[in-house]
Amino acid sequence: MKRIESLLVKKEETLFNVFKLRSMARPEDTMAVLMFGSPDPDAVASAMALREIMRQTVGLKKFAFVATEGVLRQQNQEFIRAMKVEIQLLSKIELQDYRLVAIVDAQPNFFGKTGDLIHPQIVIDHHPVTAAWHAELADVRPQYGALSTIMMEYLLAARVRIPKLLYTALLYGIKSDTNNFERDSILEDIGAYYLTSVRANRELIRRIELNQIPERYLKSFEHAYFHRRRYRDRITSFLGKVDSPDVCVQVADFYLRIVDVYYVVIAGIIKDRLIIVFRGDGYRQDCGYIAAAAFGKYGGGGGHKSAARVEIPLETLKEVLPGDWTQEAVEQFLVQRLRQKRPAKTKKRPANDARES
């Protein structure tokens, strides 16, 4: 156990950033931690970890978990209830009421035009950097499978007491973001997983994991079946109007289990946006690269080899889809963009990288 802890804590980068974090804080401080989109367990667990460090280091007079969207996925709702976390919408609060603003599991450019109005002092993330931005404390490590692993390093370096509920949150954050290590991860992720698993409430996590798909989603599974397009090892489907991006995620995850299907593209319209979710095996295709190359000029987001997400305002698509949101028209748009010849892949992905969902 001590050997694993030393692997996670004896990093100059982590020790320096924890020192910097403490030097930025003031007694009885105020902080808002901002998450992009509908927050997933990795983002929430990371925000909880940052709150714990600040609580035990300087004390917090006021703290807020903030997201741009409500929590939509059934499992994530169960998780947040179990963690006793209250998440406020960015549109409903005033960020200037908080002296410190942090972004976790995202970067300022993920927020589109809204990002121009956000000036975080702290950004901690594990997605690839695709645009220039500034923060006093900027810690981005794309090689990590989960941000929860990085935050585990912070907690150990800060030498704070870690409650069982936080161990549970971090364990679930690592499990969900690495898809139980089926996605890219490193030795530190495995070490953090072991450390948290022996101290977490694993029965609670199992209960959360069993609650996956709301019954109302079944009609979208049916729609996806009858409107799927198969091309070699890829399945593409447009679900029409859906009430949550999570519908696209659940359908994409399901189709990836089909024999000889190695990546999946599922799209749906939510309010004034076209949401496109990508899932893959992370070996034959790079979802983040495909998403950015095919749709990056229309919208933004972020992602990795095995999972990505793009959000495109419908207004942006008026030239290519002039008010025509029929099944056939949107399917044709998706297929054409995916079949276009893409530039040779480089180590750095194209700007406007698609976000993981």
Image (cartoon, grey):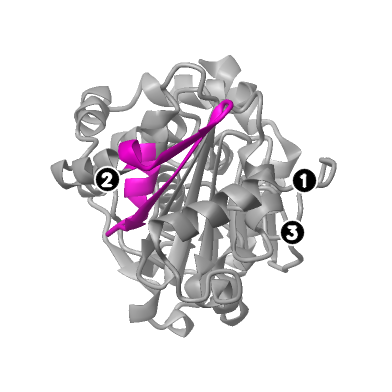
Label 1 crowd (10 A; few <14 / some 14-19 / many >=20): few
**For marks 3 and 2 on the same chain, the one whose residue lies earlier in the sequence:** 2
Disc 1, SS: loop
Q: Is residue 311 magenta?
A: no
Q: Quadrant of residue 71?
A: bottom left
Q: Position of residue 40 (x, y in %)?
A: 39, 48
Q: Nearer the viewer, residue 205 or 341?
A: 341
Q: CA distance from mark 3 to mark 2?
A: 32 Å
Disc 2, SS: helix
Q: Which residue is mark 3?
A: 351
Q: Position of residue 157 (x, y in %)?
A: 59, 39
Residue 143 is labelled as none
Vertical arrangement, residue 96 with respect to residue 168, above or below = below
> In the rendered structure, which segment of residues is drawn in magenta?
224-251
> What residue do we see at 38% from left, 79% from top?
91
> What residue do we see at 56% from left, 42% from top?
154
Amino acid type shown at disc 1: Lys
Q: Position of residue 89 (x, y in %)?
A: 34, 71
Q: Nearer the viewer, residue 125 or 131?
A: 131
344 left or right of 265 in image: right
Q: Which residue is mark 1?
A: 341
Label 2 crowd (10 A; few <14 / some 14-19 / many >=20): many
Residue 220 is labelled as 2
Q: CA distance from mark 1 to mark 2?
A: 31 Å
The answer to whether residue 357 of the structure is visible from this angle is: yes
> What residue do we see at 46% from left, 75% from top?
323
